[in-house]
Amino acid sequence: MSGPNKFGRASSLREHRALTDNYARQPVEFVRGEGLRLWDADGVEYLDFLAGISVCNVGHCHPRVVEAVRAQAGALMHVSNLFFTRPMAELAERLTASSIGGRVYFANSGAEANEAALKVVRKARPRGEIVVVHGGFHGRTYGALSATPQESKQAPFAPLVPGFVPVPPAPDAIAAAVHEGTAAVLLEVIQGESGVIVLSEEVLRAARAACDAVGAFLVLDEVQTGMGRTGTLWAYEQTGVVPDAITVAKALGGGLPIGALVCGERLAGVFAPGDHGSTFAGGPVVAAAALAAFDILDDPVLLARVRELGERLRESLRELPGVLDVRGRGLMVAADVDADAPGVVRRALLEQRLVINATGPGTLRFLPPLVLDKSHVDDAVERLAAVLP
Ligand code: PLP
């Protein structure tokens, strides 16, 4: 598709002024996507290495997801959680069979999946504290925000939900913070929003051991790391640690909004009717899309390619001048640069038509769709090189 969208550029920019100012949006309006490609309202083509912040892991508008949505939308769109639907039940089975067993609560987003996690562990261990680590990010709703110990995000919205205990992501600090009055430790295996900080195996093992010692729960937030992003379906699979619950969202719906809390055996029976709920959660259309996304991403060949191409991306980035540090796992990658990272992101977008983002003033993040090949990696690195000072 080329040319302006049906509103024309000028009128759509006017409409954008009706939106609140809580996002630092780039001056680009996308109208179409396919695989790793996006097109703007003027028909200009872009290479996407962000995937809607790790949502479009299957690529844009994957035909199998589109077909699943079309078919389900024509059959049944919504009935509420007062009834069973097959896509939801099958998706719950896929989620539990591929991870820690147990049972699934569906939500509509990552923050909502984490809210459910906070409620289920508090119900299981009444009034218990929740230990979280500095640099963690779990969402913007009040419970999830309270679990996100970052001054700039929390301070304007005080008072927060009580009962959260932030500690440095260090084995000793976690061990010291967990006691009989602890309900859970909540962690990301790799901190995405803080700049792809990989927590060490020792930290995860210390959290597991501390929880086991007092009967508390280890909850891993796989919202960004899940659905193949790190080269295994779930990031925890590459650690020696098995959690009591995981939260999932982003790429789960193949591009549509859905979240899930997988409660392992110890937590599976905690929620009773009336404890929690959400009108739209796990609806048939998003669940059908998620089943298609699962079929595409839960594939050993694809996952091996994610590991291999992640390594290629990291190696290539390390060779670029001005790149100070490169880290990550699979295709969840960050590079610290000796430059103004938001400026690099903007120039990459506007001059090189490469979509990436910055997690801080000096850190670039790369989260491409997982359906890429090595030519996409080389193309992205070449485009980036052209805008690094
Ligand atoms: N948890 C993690 C690890 C995330 O990266 C995010 C979003 O970036 C969230 C939770 C919140 O997800 P959502 O924006 O869908 O509420």
Image (cartoon, grey):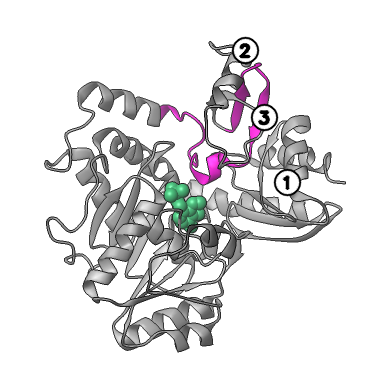
Which image quadrant for residue 348?
A: top right
Q: Which circle, 2 or 3, is nearer the viewer?
A: 3
Q: Which mark is residue 215?
A: none
Q: Nearer the viewer, residue 177 or 320?
A: 177
Q: Which badge, 2 or 3, comes first in the chain's sequence?
A: 2
Q: Position of residue 36 (x, y in %)?
A: 59, 33
Q: Nearer the viewer, residue 6 or 87?
A: 6
Q: Is residue 21 left or right of residue 87?
A: right
Q: Is residue 3 left or right of residue 19?
A: right
Q: CA distance from mark 2 to mark 1?
A: 28 Å
Circle 2 packing at 10 Å, graded few (<14), some (14-19), many (20+), is few
Q: Which residue is mark 1?
A: 342
Q: Which residue is mark 3?
A: 27
Which image quadrant for residue 211?
A: bottom left
Q: Which badge, 2 or 1, comes first in the chain's sequence?
A: 2
Q: Are marks 2 and 3 in contact (CB under 8 Å)?
A: no
Residue ID at (54%, 31%): 35
Q: Which residue is mark 2?
A: 2
Regarding mark 2 in the picture, which secondary structure is present there?
loop
Q: Position of residue 367 (x, y in %)?
A: 59, 47
- Which residue type carries mark 3? Pro
